[in-house]
Amino acid sequence: MDVQKRFGTSRELELNGVWVDIGDGARVLVARIGNTRYTEYFQKRMRPHVKALRTKTLSDAVAEEILIDVMSNTILLGWEGIFEGDQALPYSVANAKRLLQELPDFRKVINEIADEMEAYKAVELEEGAKNSERSSSGT
């Protein structure tokens, strides 16, 4: 087994996200959970709650609020084709935060994408670049 091919991921894709179709013409730009921006922001948001974490008294509501804030600022980075009714919903951190809060199943889909290693594979990125070079050189 080629360990790089099996487990190697692109730090660039993990941080800047990948576009993923989620159906009905909509797609989302999702960074990987655990990227550096995510980790730093998560640690910053958790700092005021260290004592509650240590004593296991952090409420589920506070934990969920922190998770949604972290996801909306570091994981869900954009979208296209998202509507509310017949109105296109422009991407913004505020809109992302609201949807992640109001729609737990949407949050679950974003979380699953962000946690899926295959979407961020370095080998696929390299192969895509090689194919792009070939097609632009006319071969």
Image (cartoon, rainbow, N blue to C red):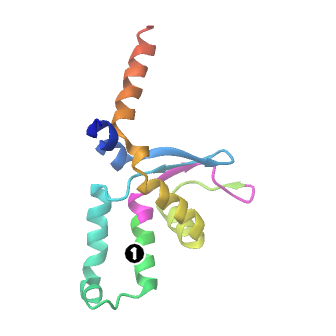
List x then y, in percent, for residue 47.
25, 78
List x then y, in percent, for residue 27.
57, 47
The structure residue drawn at horizontal position 54% and vertical position 59%, both measured from the top left corner, is: 109
Callout 1: SS: helix
Q: Is residue 60 above or below residue 115?
A: below
Nearer to the camera, 37 or 106: 106
Q: Is residue 83 magenta?
A: yes
The amino acid at mark 1 is Ile
The answer to whether any part of residue 59 appears in the image is: yes
- Residue 82 is left or right of residue 91, and the answer is right
List x then y, in percent, for residue 65.
44, 77
List x then y, in percent, for residue 81.
63, 48
Nearer to the camera, 67 or 114: 114
The answer to whether any part of residue 9 appears in the image is: no
Nearer to the camera, 95 or 13: 13
Q: Is residue 77 above or below residue 66?
A: above
The stretch in magenta equals: 71-86
Q: Is residue 118 magenta?
A: no
Which residue in the structure is indicated by mark 1? 66
